[in-house]
């Protein structure tokens, strides 16, 4: 039995139909379904892991660092992009790069002024270095503890109370195995501001 040759128009129509089906499935149904599922299963994460103060005002995301310049608050890591979330990344400077050396020496000079009670050899490296994204919201517990003399002197909150705050806000390793212990700066500063306002 002889088969009729398939016309180019028939091929074209098949391609158009398949494209329309894939656009509807992948471009409309799948995004809507995954968004709806995320809103049901993990609404906080789906909406950016936003943190709000007592008044319900959004003050940031627990996933993106902020530049805390107030000396009475805990400070995070340096950021070569000024914590601009739309420009994630960092300068890939080597340790001998002149810009990197200047930024580091400027930071250390400012550290000595702001934290005269803490010797420079006790300054944790994560306070001097940039993270890969420039948006890291965490520092090491040691980097938080080393700032306590300055904060205690400016806020009047006893050092022991500040140490307890740092301990309460220290997050463990992921699954108990991966990464290092860390402190989320925004959460810690929120707790500090709440404690200072009492």
Image (cartoon, grey):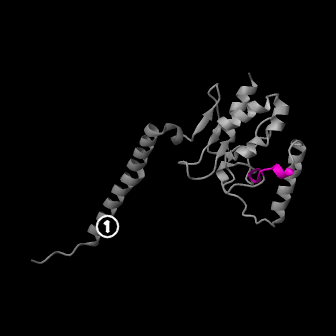
Q: Secondary structure at mark 1?
A: helix
Of 137 and 88, nearer the camera is 137
Q: Which quarter shows the N terminus? A: bottom left
With 71 as the anchor, is 43 left or right in this view? left
Query: Vertical placement of 10 versus 32: above or below?
Result: below
Of 6 and 24, nearer the camera is 24
Q: Which residue is mark 1?
A: 12
With 10 as the anchor, is 75 left or right in this view? right
Query: Which residue is located at x 23 percent, y 73 percent?
Result: 6
Does residue 71 appear anywhere in the picture? Answer: no
Does residue 137 appear anywhere in the picture? Answer: yes
Query: Vertical placement of 7 versus 177: above or below?
Result: below
Q: From which residue to which does the magenta span run?
A: 120-127
In the displayed orientation, state which residue is furthest to the left.
1
Q: Residue 152's image quarter?
A: top right
Q: Which quarter shows the C terminus? A: top right
């Amino acid at each position: 039995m002889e088969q009729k040759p398939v016309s180019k128009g028939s091929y074209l129509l098949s391609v158009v139909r398949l494209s329309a089906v894939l656009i509807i499935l992948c471009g409309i149904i799948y995004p809507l379904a995954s968004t709806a599922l995320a809103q049901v299963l993990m609404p906080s994460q789906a909406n950016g892991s936003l943190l709000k103060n007592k008044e319900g005002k959004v003050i940031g995301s627990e996933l993106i660092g902020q530049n805390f310049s107030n000396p009475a608050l805990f400070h995070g890591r340096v950021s070569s992009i000024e914590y601009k979330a739309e420009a994630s990344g960092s300068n890939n400077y080597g340790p001998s790069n002149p810009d990197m050396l200047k930024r580091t020496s400027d930071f250390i000079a400012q550290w000595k002024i702001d934290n005269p009670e803490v010797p420079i050899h006790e300054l944790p490296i994560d306070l001097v270095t940039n993270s890969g994204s420039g948006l890291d919201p965490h520092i090491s517990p040691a980097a938080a503890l080393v700032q306590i003399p300055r904060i205690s002197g400016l806020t009047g909150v006893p050092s022991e109370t500040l140490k307890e705050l740092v301990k309460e806000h220290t997050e463990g390793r992921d699954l108990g195995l991966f990464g290092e212990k860390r402190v989320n700066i925004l959460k810690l500063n929120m707790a500090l501001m709440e404690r200072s306002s009492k």
